[in-house]
Image (cartoon, coloured by chain):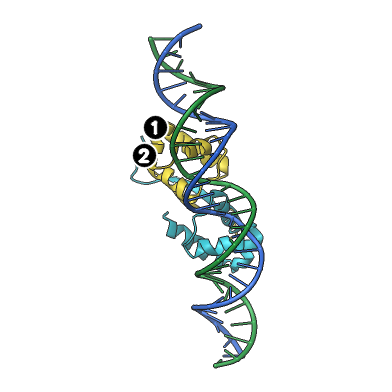
Chain colours: A yellow, B cyan, C blue, D green
Amino acid sequence: MHFSELIKTIKERREVLQVTQQGLADLSGVGLRTLKQFESGKGNPTLLTLQKMADVLGMEVYLKIKNGTPNK
Amino acid sequence: MHFSELIKTIKERREVLQVTQQGLADLSGVGLRTLKQFESGKGNPTLLTLQKMADVLGMEVYLKIKNGTPNK
DNA sequence: AATAATAGTGCCGTAAAATGCACTTTGCAC
DNA sequence: GTGCAAAGTGCATTTTACGGCACTATTATT
């Protein structure tokens, strides 16, 4: 997933769950400013920050082997 | 995936592909020091850094819905 | 159109990530 | 145990994420 896809995923998920940025900020412990920055595509969050956000949204950060990749 | 799992995944993948930290650093453009720090569990990489590493290893960062999560 | 709620941005201080360099430690051959 | 390669660590610097605050912009509701 590219950066923009990750953003879109988080954003959409948040909206589906009907949580505002403020709400997610409160629940996740991530600063509102940081959240806004990320969702508006102007951030490069640390893994920890991303995990905090994902966690509250019932998601998790995953490392997936790309399909088409010669597996060794 | 927790932090330690992500680290383990990257590390193992790197070893399977028989790439050294130095090699991965060169290929990914991530600093060697940063790589070492991450693999030894003492870092909190930015999403961009993680993506660079994953990319070279034929992997990608993914956001997955946790199973057991009420999908609304 | 006025209001209210939600989202985006500028400014800015603080904390931490990214990185290089040099050194130590570890692991594995021979 | 010597030697070499790979991995880990301490130190210092530069860059940048984090986060608060205040303000603007957008969107929805009445």
Query: Residue A59 occupies which quadrant of the picture?
Result: top left
Residue found at x 58% / y 59% = B57
Residue under numbered circle 2: A27
- Residue A72 visible somewhere in the drawing: no
Q: SS of the residue at dot 2? A: helix
| Contact check, label 1 and label 2, Cβ < 8 Å | yes
Q: SS of the residue at dot 1? A: loop
- Residue B6 visible somewhere in the drawing: yes
**Where is residue B39 shown, x and y percent of the image?**
51, 63
Number of marks in the image? 2
The chain to which mark 2 is attached is A
Please name whichever residue, A51 or A43, is drawn nearer the observer in this view of the structure: A43
**Where is residue D15 shown, x and y percent of the image?**
63, 49
* Mark 2 burial class by Cα count in 10 Å: few <14, some 14-19, many 20+: some
Q: CA distance from mark 1 to mark 2?
A: 10 Å
On residue A19, which mark appears? Answer: 1
In the rendered view, tell whether residue C10 sits above or below residue B53: above
The amino acid at mark 1 is Val
The chain to which mark 1 is attached is A
Residue found at x 49% / y 65% = B40
* Same chain? Circles 1 and 2: yes
Please name whichever residue, D2 or D27, is drawn nearer the observer in this view of the structure: D2
* Mark 1 burial class by Cα count in 10 Å: few <14, some 14-19, many 20+: some
User: Is B31 positioned to the left or the right of D7 in the image?
Assistant: right
Q: Earlier in the sequence, mark 1 or mark 2?
A: 1
Residue found at x 57% / y 38% = A42
Tell me the quadrant of the picture where the N terminus of chain B can be found: bottom left
Query: Residue B16 occupies which quadrant of the picture?
Result: bottom right
The amino acid at mark 2 is Leu
**Where is residue C17 shown, x and y percent of the image?**
53, 54
Mark whose residue sits in front, 1 or 2: 2
In the rendered view, tell whether residue D26 sits above or below residue B18: above
